[in-house]
Image (spheres, rainbow, N blue to C red):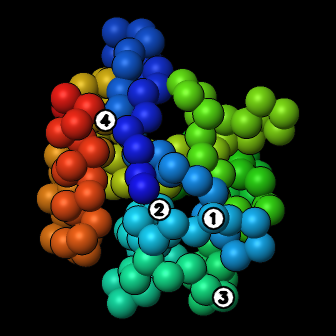
């Protein structure tokens, strides 16, 4: 089941707290737990980033979903500034759960795929390239995303339940 994840972002007034979506457990064919709602959230974010079709968001993680993840990994295999600044992500075929308060791995120092997917979603909906405030990031991930007309209703319900339980 997806979870609320608090992070620090470089906002207009320095370090600010933001809230994004995290996984309860890893998603990926070979090592992932592949909980249905976690898999559906990853599929939705991959769809929003242009790596799969709306019809591919079903919560079932099979080879087809794995191929979309591999394409995403290849697109962000190293440091990039287009379409977003990123240190790159690991090429291991798995979307790991982010550790509390972290946006990158402690060993690889590469960005967690879930963090990058959340950032891509936020970036697409911002009107300006300036750094987003923690409040703006939270508004987009907790309100805009959970009401996105492309998100399956079962996932919307789950995310709204988690958001409300976190008092957001």
Label 3 SS: helix
Residue linked to disc 2: 38
Q: Which residue is mark 1?
A: 33
Residue 95 located left or right of residue 4: right
Q: Earlier in the sequence, mark 1 or mark 3?
A: 1
Are the residues flagged by discs 1 and 2 in contact, CB closer than 8 Å? Answer: yes
Instruction: Write down the residue under mark 4.
Output: 137
Q: Secondary structure at mark 2?
A: helix
What crowding class fits label 1: few (fewer than 14 Cα within 10 Å), some (14-19), or many (20 or more)?
Answer: some
Tell me the CA gap for discs 2 and 3. Answer: 16 Å
Q: Where 69 sits versus 136, above or below?
A: below
The label nearer to you, 2 versus 4, is: 2
Judging from the image, what secondary structure is the residue with disc 1 in? loop
- Residue at (68, 65) in percent of width and height: 32
Nearer to us of marks 2 and 3 is 2
- What is the distance, in whole Å, between disc 1 and disc 3 at their CAs? 15 Å
Residue 17 in percent (x, y) is at: 37, 19
Which of marks 4 and 1 precedes in the sequence?
1
* Dot in front, 1 or 2: 1
Residue named by callout 3: 63
> Up-down: is 117 above or below 8?
below
């Amino acid at each position: 089941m997806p979870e609320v994840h608090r992070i620090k972002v470089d906002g207009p007034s320095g370090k600010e707290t933001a809230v994004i979506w995290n996984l309860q457990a890893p998603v990926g064919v070979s090592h992932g737990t592949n909980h249905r709602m976690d898999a559906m959230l990853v599929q939705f974010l991959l769809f929003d980033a242009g790596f799969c079709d709306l019809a591919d968001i079903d919560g079932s993680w099979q080879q087809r979903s794995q191929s979309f993840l591999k394409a995403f990994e290849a697109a962000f295999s190293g440091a990039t500034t287009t379409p977003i600044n990123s240190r790159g992500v690991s090429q291991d075929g798995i979307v790991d759960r982010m550790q509390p308060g972290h946006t990158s791995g402690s060993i690889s120092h590469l960005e967690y795929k879930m963090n990058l997917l959340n950032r891509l979603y936020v970036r697409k909906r911002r009107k300006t390239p300036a750094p987003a405030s923690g409040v703006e990031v939270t508004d987009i991930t907790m309100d805009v995303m959970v009401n996105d007309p492309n998100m399956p209703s079962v996932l919307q319900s789950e995310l709204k339940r988690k958001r409300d339980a976190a008092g957001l």
